[in-house]
Each structure stands twice: as structure tokens, then as C-alpha cells.
Image: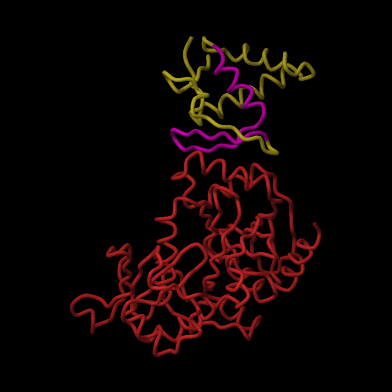
Chain colours: A red, B yellow
Amino acid sequence: MIVNNLSIGEIRNRLSGDGLRIASGPFNCRIQSAFPELAQDLARLYAHHSLVPDDTFIDFHVAVQVGYGLRRWLRPQARFVVDGIEPFTPLPRAQALPMIEWGMNWCITAYSQNVLILHAAAVARGNRAIIMPAPPGSGKSTLCAALVNRGWRLLSDELTIIRLDTGEVSGLARPVNLKNKSIDIIRAFAPDAFLTQPVLDTTKGTVALMAPSAESVRDIEQLAMPCWMILPRYRPGASTSLTPMKTGAAFLQIADNAMNYHVLGIKGFKAVGHLVDRCKHFNFEYSQLDEAIARFDHLASED
Amino acid sequence: MFYSIATGERRSSEGVFWKEVDEGWIRYEEHSGNTQLINPLARFIIDLIDRSVEPLSIPDIANEVLLAEPDTEPSTCLVEVEAVLRTLSEAQLILAVRP
């Protein structure tokens, strides 16, 4: 059974009651919300995700709750709560939806030390994955969103999960977090994609969430082997260029973007080493999404 | 100036892991969690100092490099060795000591 099988009323009831239990790759999440207006967007964003039976283990119990005291009425706030802990300061109620996404990312990063977690987007063709670590503002999410709207499978937009035993990437297929100009760019590029209404004035600027494709969610259990590590950089007016990167530089890039490299210790060092060995590494500069996608398609067809 | 390993009681190779990469080596130190990209000459010098019971002088080290790479121009070798020693010392991978 998937989220789409539920009516909006049922989703709203679950969010305000015992929680909406969804599976996102290796993680099961229970989402509760005191804000009924989130039901519609969550229904669209997670439409194809499986519902987790009541007796199944839940990794993260997350909730967005109303602010304390007068904050319930004056400048209403949303509080993110996980297992009774509030890791963030409250945000304006209008930011409750992105707050859930940021909060779930925080949960994965804080609690999942049995996998290597990269701050990176990952997409796949068949079972071969491209990993794209990059700092904010590099155009990573825009490129990721464009690729998944042209036939690539979304593994993750924000956190790439690498198994320590096999080195494979586990898909999450959660919503893509678009920011600022990239929102209009993706709206124009993929008019059929579902994007939430932009949320203004967040710490990341204006944000909107894009729903993952049904195919990406359907194949979520299909692990992918990382084959390429590409460091994307959007530069206005740049021609598309893919430049090989040496493995030492690639190692440092991956280690820098690994959220739990230091926590894992020698396991992290070995996991990054194996990842470096099995991937080809490139710097990638682009300004035109169609050209960028053609270059990625070509890359995937070469080997 | 002489050079020794900076880690005091234990040998530098304890808890240190290496991975070969295009540019040379990645050095990972388990105790500190530090990860560094090390070029082949720097790796050679670290190993040399680590194996030596006594601190080594710059000419000692340059001579060892020349023995390993006889085609190297001696004056160039000395300059390169000095540069690597400076870098390794700044990174606290080796310790400069007075004779």
C-alpha cells in the first residue's frame, strides 16, 4: 500500500494522530504534524512511497508541532521534534514543510552510523550511479532535478547513503529541495513535475520541494553501484565541460563531503577509498541543462 | 636543523593508514582523524625519518633521496627536500629539532 492509496482526509488524520508511516529506502519514518495544511503537499511529495505497517520498526519518529504559549497565535511557529528532542530552534509556521525535510536529513546524519553518508546528490541509470558532492550554490540540486525529469532515477538529492559492506548506494527518493532561481528554472524545464508553493525567507532563501518520479520511488529498493563521482558547478554562460579529476583530489572531495567520515574512523577511510577506486572522477561545469543532461547521457552510454 | 617524528613515544606508523592515489598517497591518522594528500617524495621522507633512530639532518635526507633516485640533480634535490621538510613540519607530521 502506498501513500497515494489514502484520501487526503486519511492522511490528515494520520498526521494529526498516530502518524503517517512511510518507507524511504533503508529508513522508516513516522511523521506527525499539528498543521493540517501540510497534508496536501505531503500527499503529493510522498505519493508513491510505501506505507509502513503499524508493527514495523520505525527509525525516526518526527513531528512538527505548534509553538509554545502566545506563539500559538502571535507569529505562529513550528517546532521540529524527533523522539522528544528538539534539535532546532522553532521556525515560522510557513516553513513547517521544509522543516520536516531538513529534520529528516538531520535524523539520518545524526543517527545512522552504519553507513557512509555523503552530502551529495545521487542519480542512477539502471544500477549505475553518479554521485555529485558539491557545496550549496553549485547547482547540484538543479542538475539533479533536471536529470530525474529526463529519465535518470533519483537516489537522493541531499544525502547519499553508501553501504559499508558492499559500497552500494541506497536510494531514498525523497523530495528534491530547490532553492531560489532554480525553482523557476525547473518549473520551466519540467512543467509536469510537482513542485510545492515556494516558501519565502528561509535560512536557505526561497525554497520549494519537487516530488520524486514514480519510477524512482518504485525502484527504491534497487541498490546502485557508484560508477562516477562528478563535482558539478553552475557558471552563467559557461560551455559544458567534463574534466577528469585525479584520485587524490577526489578522495579529499569525498571525505570533505562525508558527514560521518570522522565518526566512522578507519571504516570511513576504507569506505571512501573503495568509493574512489570504483568511480571515475570529474569536475563538471555547465550553464545549459539540456547540454548537461546530454553529456551525462553520453557518459552513461560510454562504458 | 635536524628532523624527527613528532609523535613522541609511539612510532608515527602506528595507527596510520595509507592509500595510493594518482598524486601520491592519502595518509590517514586514526588517532587524530586527520587526512592528508602526500606526494611521493614526502612519503619517502616520512618513512625515512620514521625508520631512523636518531634525528636526521637535511643533507642526510637529501643523500638518501639521491641514493634512491640517482638521476636527480643534487642542488634541485636539496631545494625540494627542504621545501618538503618545511611543509611536513608545518603540518606537524615531523618535528624540527636543534642538534
Decide if residue A134 is on the left or right side of residue B73: left
Picture coordinates of residue A4, whole percent (x, y): 51, 84
Residue at x 60% of width, y 50% of height: A167
Question: A7 and A83: which one is in front?
Answer: A7
Q: Quadrant location of residue A226? A: bottom right
The answer to whether residue B1 is visible is no
Residue that lies at the very extreme toward the left in this rendered image: A69
Q: Is residue A218 magenta?
A: no
Decide if residue A139 is on the left or right side of residue A296: left
Viewport quadrant of the C terminus of chain A:
bottom right
Q: Is residue B46 above or below residue B91?
A: above
Picture coordinates of residue A40, whole percent (x, y): 44, 86
Q: Is residue B39 magenta?
A: yes
The answer to whether residue A104 is visible is yes
Looking at the rendering, the stretch of residues picked out in magenta corresponds to B24-52
Residue at x 67% of width, y 14% of height: B64
Residue that lies at the very extreme toward the front in this rendered image: A55
Residue at x 30% of width, y 64% of height: A83
Q: Is residue A29 above or below residue A92?
A: above
Question: A8 and B70: which one is in front?
Answer: A8
Picture coordinates of residue A45, whole percent (x, y): 50, 79
Picture coordinates of residue A275, whole percent (x, y): 62, 48
Question: A216 and B26: which one is in front?
Answer: A216
Q: How many numbered marks appear?
A: 0
Q: Is residue B23 above or below residue A84?
A: above
Residue at x 51% of width, y 77% of height: A209
